[in-house]
C-alpha cells in the first residue's frame, strides 16, 4: 500500500511568486491534514479536511494560503504571493476513520522563498 | 488548546548509551504518537500510543494517560538514532494533533 506522497519535494521560488504543493493521502483515508515547520521551530497545524470539506482551518496563517481537496482525494496547498517567512517544510498527513486515529505523514515539501 | 511539553530539549549521548525522552500534556488525550525526524527531514512513525506500553526493537514507549505523560526509551543508542523526536497529541474535541517542540538527540560514535 502506498504511503502519503507529496510533491514537489523541494521548491525554490522568489518572493511574490506562487507555489502549489500537492498531497496524495493513503487510499481510503478520509482525514487529511496540512502542517508546517518554519525556521526549525515546532510543527504547527494548518488545516484539516474530512473528505472534501474543511473541518478546521484555524491554523492557516493568512489569506495568502489556499487549500483545496478535490473530490475528497488529493489536496493542494497554494501560497500566493509567497513571502520570505513562508520558507519551511510543509507536511501532509492522513488518517482513516475517526480523526483520533493514527496519523501517517508524507516526506514533506521543502519551500525556500528567496 | 492542549499544551505539549517535551524534555529535555537537547540530548547528547555516546553510542551504546540509553536514554529517556519525556512528553507532558495538559489535558486528556485520545491520540498520542511519537515521531522521529531524520536528518533528511522525514517524519517517521515510531509509536501510536494513547495509553499503555509498546516495544519495537531497541525502542519502547509508555503512556500514562491519567497522569498526562508519555516516555520514549531508546536503548543501546546508535548514530542513526540522531535527529529530532516529536510527541504529538490529539483529543476527541479537535481533529488536529498538537506537537511538542521536540527533543534533538545527537549520538556520537
Image (tube, coloured by chain):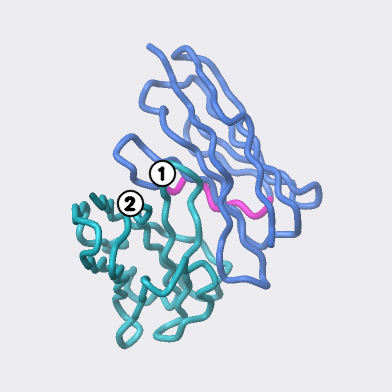
Residue B46 magenta-drawn?
A: yes
Assign the N terminus of chain A to one quadrant of the image. bottom left
**Quadrant hosting residue A19:** bottom left
Q: Residue at x 51, y 67 (%)?
A: A59
Position of residue B36 measured from the top left corner of the image (x, y, whole percent): 44, 40
Q: Secondary structure at mark 1?
A: loop
Give me the chain letter of mark 2.
Answer: A
* Nearer the observer, B5 or B76: B5
Segment colored magenta: B45-51
Chain A: what color?
Answer: cyan
Q: Is residue B79 left or right of residue A1?
A: right
Chain B: what color?
Answer: blue
Q: Are marks 1 and 2 on the same chain?
A: yes
Position of residue A65 measured from the top left corner of the image (x, y, whole percent): 37, 71
Marks 2 and 1: in contact by CB < 8 Å? yes
- Answer with mark 1 or mark 2, whichever residue precedes in sequence: 1
Find residue A39 and name its label: 1
Residue B11 magenta-drawn?
A: no
Q: Residue at x 26, y 50 (%)?
A: A112
Give me the chain letter of mark 1.
Answer: A
Classify B101 as above or below B105. below
Q: Residue at x 72, y 44 (%)?
A: B69
Classify A17 as above or below B53. below
Residue topped by disc 2: A87
Amino acid at each position: 500500500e502506498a504511503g502519503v506522497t507529496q510533491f514537489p519535494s523541494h521548491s525554490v521560488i522568489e518572493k511574490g511568486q506562487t507555489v502549489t504543493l500537492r498531497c496524495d493521502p493513503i487510499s481510503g483515508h478520509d482525514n487529511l491534514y496540512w502542517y508546517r515547520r518554519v525556521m526549525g521551530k515546532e510543527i504547527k497545524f494548518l488545516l484539516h479536511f474530512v473528505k472534501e470539506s474543511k473541518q478546521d482551518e484555524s491554523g492557516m496563517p493568512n489569506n495568502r494560503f489556499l487549500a483545496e481537496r478535490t473530490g475528497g482525494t488529493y489536496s493542494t496547498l497554494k501560497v500566493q504571493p509567497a513571502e520570505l517567512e513562508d520558507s519551511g517544510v510543509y507536511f501532509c498527513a492522513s488518517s482513516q476513520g475517526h480523526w483520533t486515529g493514527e496519523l501517517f505523514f508524507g516526506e514533506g515539501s521543502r519551500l525556500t522563498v528567496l | 488548546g492542549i499544551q505539549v511539553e517535551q524534555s529535555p530539549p537537547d540530548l547528547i549521548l555516546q553510542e551504546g548509551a540509553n536514554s529517556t525522552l519525556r512528553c507532558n500534556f495538559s489535558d486528556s488525550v485520545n491520540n498520542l504518537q511519537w515521531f522521529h525526524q531524520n536528518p533528511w527531514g522525514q517524519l517517521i512513525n515510531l509509536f501510536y500510543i494513547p495509553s499503555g506500553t509498546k516495544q519495537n526493537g531497541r525502542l519502547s514507549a509508555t503512556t500514562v494517560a491519567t497522569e498526562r505523560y508519555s516516555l520514549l526509551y531508546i536503548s543501546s543508542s546508535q548514530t542513526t538514532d540522531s535527529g529530532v523526536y516529536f510527541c504529538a497529541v490529539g483529543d476527541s474535541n479537535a481533529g488536529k494533533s498538537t506537537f511538542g517542540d521536540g527533543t534533538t538527540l545527537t549520538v556520537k560514535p
